[in-house]
Image: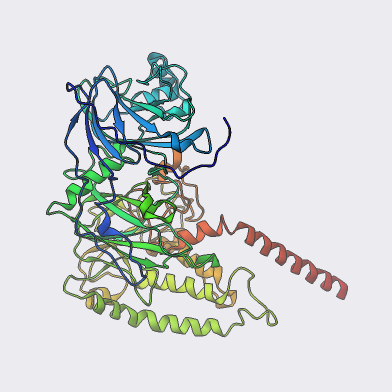
């Protein structure tokens, strides 16, 4: 076929479903609507850094008249969403067709087509536990007559595609299908990227799709899947990206705050937050089975927002945790969620909306990022504070009475922070930090990083991080409640992954103003991470003589450490190893200050981010600095030897 100039792509013609007797499949056409378009307008990020937006309402797409399906596949329109149902015990699949117009092949004999399948609801078939290559696993696979990959796929809904007129009902028994033309709905979502070749010149090219129930239902015999399907030749309209996720700051009884990943250019990405209870009404049927499903998440979010339990989401821009290591002027979007219920677990997703080729008229694409967990507190004495002028990296709950205003509480705390920081800054400024003529103390640190480290430490010790009190701190906390257990003998690793929390009240708070002026009653204090102290020692001139307490002597009364630290409270990736995919610590990151459910091991105040950046992206710079230091040392040795 000769190469021709490509004309602008056109949508395929509208193919209404063909009427006929009702079968096990029931299609619901959601024409020209995508799952986030109408429901998420209220939570669009603001256009200016000072603005904010609020999610006060939500709607789900309105369906058209129900159309019965027949043995003839249901026709799909380009970039239009269709919903359908499929019985778990169906002996055949649900079938669709999609037609690429001949005009789309103006300059090439292949057209890329994206297909997205989401499971909105249905039975939860538990997967086989194949995480380890053990004898029981091998025995199980032998009894199933499957490989490990086949066993993992067998409990999932599958989608198959074909462009061959002889295979208009593609499925597990279809031969000759490329491996990339089938996919499994893991987490409730599957996608196909098809390069479809035109079989006949100047003719439309059909694609046939088949959605089939799991091969292995694990003894479940009843249930109905509701699914959502969309095909497009314009762009991949729905995608799941596991490379980025939100970062929880903290919660109080009714509010939560979290951050997006950093970005370097403006405007900010168009991000929407979806916050659902992890269990009960308005939650996903099964989080593990539908946690990547666009329609399941959107349907639950719409139902929550129409209920008396609706939540609001406000967005703003922040530079919190972005100025470390002089990387660049990064920014983040921060989300403040209000209207939550006390003592409740929630699951949160971020969804990014983008215009195709920056032209909304061409359509929108939606990217779903991995979920993260959080739990609201039960203690009314914990209050979430953020955007604190004198402690810019603080975004967590502090102990304060409901009768004391946030403004008054912060003013009280600043009467301690301001003079201490001023005196420390004045002392540091007496050292010629950046003057090479008088001797720089470091090639990788400066007086500014020293002051920043000190301010974070100062804020951590003057603004204690508040959490719920522990009913039995001796068994629920790794911290020493009164210091009596610290004898200098090794305390070992935190193998039980307990938080470093000390129960406090108005009389034993570390700062008298907590009880006297902030009026806090009983609460739990998440101790500062000891690396906040170490980082001052690491970044400041040695002449200051800054020292931190010994871990097994007194430190565990006033400090905690990361979940993956070693037996002396330092290091990362230790404490028995991270487990498969970081499952032991709730994630794959090192310097773990928060578990996978948002529970803090210690109050990091961003030092975990500093350490991760310093020990990964900054390795090259550090190596270069070390080489320069070695060169200077070698020169000094030569001069000294020459003097002798």
Q: Can you name the residue that lies furthest to the front here? A: 202
Dividing the picture into quadrants, the one containing residue 181 is top left
Judge from the rendering whether residue 488 lies leftward or rightward of residue 345; answer left or right. right
Query: Which quarter of the figure is the N terminus placed in?
Result: top right
Image spot of residue 617 (x, y percent): 57, 57
Q: Is residue 30 visible?
A: yes
Q: Residue at x 27, y 77 (%)?
A: 513
Q: Position of residue 481 (x, y in %)?
A: 32, 60
Coordinates of residue 475 in the picture (x, y in percent): 30, 49
Out of 2 and 635, give the one closest to the viewer. Answer: 2
Classify residue 223 as left or right of residue 140.
left
Left or right of 121, for residue 579 = right
Q: Quadrant of residue 214?
A: top left
Inspect this view and state whether residue 526 appears: no
Quarter of the image where the C terminus is located: bottom right
Q: Is residue 147 above or below residue 299?
A: above
Horizontal and vertical percent position of residue 464: 33, 68
* Residue 419 drawn above or below residue 449: below
Residue for point 23% across, 59% down: 55
**Residue farthest to the left?**
308
Q: Identify whether 315 is placed above or below 642.
A: above
Looking at the image, which residue is at 42% across and 68% down?
319
Q: Nearer the viewer, residue 201 or 35?
A: 201
Color theme of the render:
rainbow
């Amino acid at each position: 076929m000769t190469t021709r100039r490509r004309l602008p792509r056109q949508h395929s013609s509208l193919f209404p479903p063909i009427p006929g007797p009702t079968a096990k499949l029931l299609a619901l056409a959601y024409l020209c609507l995508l799952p986030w378009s109408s429901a998420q307008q209220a939570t669009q990020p603001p256009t200016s850094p000072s603005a904010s937006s609020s999610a006060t309402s939500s709607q789900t797409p309105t369906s058209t008249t129900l159309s019965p399906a027949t043995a003839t596949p249901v026709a799909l329109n380009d970039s239009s969403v269709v919903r359908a149902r499929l019985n778990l015990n169906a002996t055949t699949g649900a079938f669709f067709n999609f037609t690429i117009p001949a005009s789309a092949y103006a300059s090439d004999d292949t057209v890329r087509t994206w297909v997205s399948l989401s499971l909105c609801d249905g039975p939860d078939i538990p997967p086989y536990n194949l995480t380890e290559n053990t004898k029981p696993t091998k025995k199980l696979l032998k009894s199933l007559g499957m490989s490990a990959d086949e066993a993992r796929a067998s409990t999932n809904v599958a989608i198959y595609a074909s462009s061959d007129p002889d295979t208009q009902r593609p499925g597990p028994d279809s031969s000759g299908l490329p491996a990339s033309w089938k996919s499994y709905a893991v987490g409730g979502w599957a996608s196909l990227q098809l390069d479809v070749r035109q079989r006949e010149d100047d003719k439309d090219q059909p694609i046939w799709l088949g959605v089939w129930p799991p091969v292995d239902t694990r003894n479940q015999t009843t249930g109905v899947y509701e699914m959502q399907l969309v095909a497009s030749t314009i762009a991949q309209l729905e995608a799941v990206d596991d490379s980025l996720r939100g970062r929880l700051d903290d919660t109080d009884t009714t509010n939560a705050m979290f951050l997006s990943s950093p970005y370097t250019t403006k405007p900010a990405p168009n991000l929407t937050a979806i916050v659902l209870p992890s269990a009960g009404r308005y939650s996903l049927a099964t989080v593990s089975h539908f946690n990547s499903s666009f329609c399941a998440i959107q349907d639950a979010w719409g139902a929550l927002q129409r209920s008396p339990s609706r939540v609001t989401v406000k967005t703003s821009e922040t530079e919190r945790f972005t100025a470390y290591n002089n990387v660049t002027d990064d920014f983040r979007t921060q989300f403040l969620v209000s209207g939550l219920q006390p003592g409740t677990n929630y699951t949160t997703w971020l969804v990014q909306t983008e215009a195709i080729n920056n032209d909304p008229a061409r359509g929108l694409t939606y990217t779903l990022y991995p979920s993260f967990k959080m739990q609201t507190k039960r203690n009314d004495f914990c209050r979430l504070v953020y955007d604190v002028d004198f402690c810019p990296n603080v975004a967590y709950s502090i102990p304060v009475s409901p009768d004391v205003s946030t403004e008054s509480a912060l003013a009280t705390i600043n009467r301690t922070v301001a003079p201490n920081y001023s005196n420390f800054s004045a002392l540091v400024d007496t050292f010629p930090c950046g003057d090479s003529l008088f001797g720089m103390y470091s090639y990788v640190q400066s007086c500014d990083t020293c002051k920043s480290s000190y301010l974070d430490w100062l804020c951590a010790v003057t603004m204690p991080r508040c959490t719920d009190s522990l009913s039995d701190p001796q068994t629920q906390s790794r911290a020493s409640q009164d210091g009596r257990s610290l004898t200098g003998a090794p305390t070992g690793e935190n193998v039980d992954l307990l938080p470093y929390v000390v129960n406090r009240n108005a009389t034993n708070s570390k700062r008298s103003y907590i009880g006297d002026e902030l009026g806090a009653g009983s609460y739990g204090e998440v101790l500062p991470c000891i690396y906040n102290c170490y980082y001052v020692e690491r970044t400041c001139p040695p002449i200051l003589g800054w020292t931190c307490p010994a871990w097994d002597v007194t430190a565990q009364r006033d400090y905690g450490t990361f979940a993956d630290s070693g037996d002396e409270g330092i290091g990362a990736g230790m404490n028995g190893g991270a487990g498969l995919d970081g499952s032991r610590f709730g994630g794959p990151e090192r310097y773990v200050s928060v578990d996978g459910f948002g529970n803090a091991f210690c109050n990091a105040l961003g030092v975990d981010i500093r350490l991760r950046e310093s020990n990964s992206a900054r390795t090259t710079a550090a190596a270069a600095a070390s080489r320069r230091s070695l060169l200077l040392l070698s020169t000094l040795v030569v001069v000294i030897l020459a003097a002798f």
